[in-house]
Amino acid sequence: MNTRELGRTGLEVSEIGYGAWGIAGDWWVGATDAESLRALHRAVDLGVTFVDTALGYGRGHSESLVGRVVRERREAVHVATKVPPKNRLWPARAGVPVSECFPPEWILRSCESSLRNLGMERVDLLQLHTWQDEYLDQDGWSDALLGLKASGKVRFLGISVNDHDPASALRAVASGVFDTVQVIYNIFDQSPEAELFPACVRHGVGVIARVPLDEGGLTGTITPSTGFAEGDFRVRYFRDGRKREVFARGQALATLLGDEAQSLPELALRFCLAHDAVSTVIPGMRRVATVEANCAVADGRRLSPALRQALKAHAWNRNFYE
């Protein structure tokens, strides 16, 4: 398992991290705790040293599973979690003051809840789960975060950038408050490359690439006839004619498979790792087989310039979360 520096933090993290939303058992139907625990343990076996969870994932259930595994292991595993917005609105709405989303007492209370769920005295990375650029000009939230850092309950601070809006984090990256940004980055959404990634490199901010497989759209398993269980958020994400669109684009991408990547998930993950600004990629992983396949990509091989250039033509400007 190759590792990279997480920006200026000094932490070395695995190129493939563990996205722990899917094991929460709420928005993703089909996860079982037994299989999730096996998958987490297998990830650590294979060298995964970075796990990303959140208080909002199953009302802390994901954190509880992550904490259980990390406490049972002798290996050093860096845990990142997130403070949910108090108004429970994802993504953050423009014009809504930060006092409604991240008032200081809410940040402190949420951090304490996460530490209890994790069974830890300190978390490596605490992130705000939504973000608006205007928050930088409003008071309260930053003092709370910096106070947690000063107290030793939190080592580093970050934000999770609003869906498909990397430009909204540019001032945050330059502010000096945040050590990391978590952003959607995949073959379809290549927009962070334009401004956000260069800014992160300039300011030593680590990049956590989320949704590398487009919620399944870049796995090659979504067809026009694919069905999802009631309650699974992908029912909405792939509604109307979206499955047909994704299938067609997946077939087009499949023509690029070969020696450099033999499957669409491998191609998608190698695409993310091909950019030097990326510190770690956090695909959602609920099953042992998925963990093994994804971790195999962190072998140090990089896509050729020719293939990276060919993938630029597959960028797709849309927002399925809307």
Image (cartoon, rainbow, N blue to C red):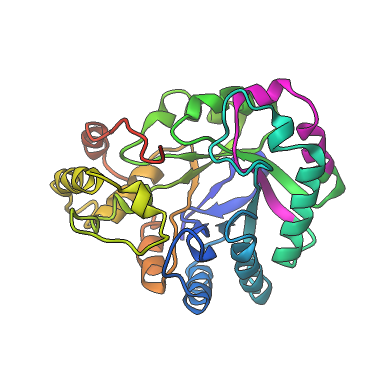
Residue 159 picture location, percent across and down? 61, 38
Residue 59 appears in the picture as rendered: yes
Residue 146 picture location, percent across and down? 80, 38
Residue 269 appears in the picture as rendered: no
Q: Provide the residue span drawn in magenta.
A: 123-147
Q: Residue at left 82%, top 43%? A: 105
Residue 237 picture location, percent across and down? 36, 47
Residue 321 painted magenta: no
Residue sitting farthest toward the right? 151
Residue 143 painted magenta: yes
Q: Is residue 292 above or below residue 267?
A: below
Q: Is residue 137 above or below residue 233?
A: above
Q: Residue at left 54%, top 64%? A: 24
Choose top left, top right, bottom left or bottom right for residue 148: top right
* In the image: residue 204, left or right of residue 287: right
Q: Is residue 146 above or below residue 136?
A: below
Residue sitting farthest toward the bottom? 34
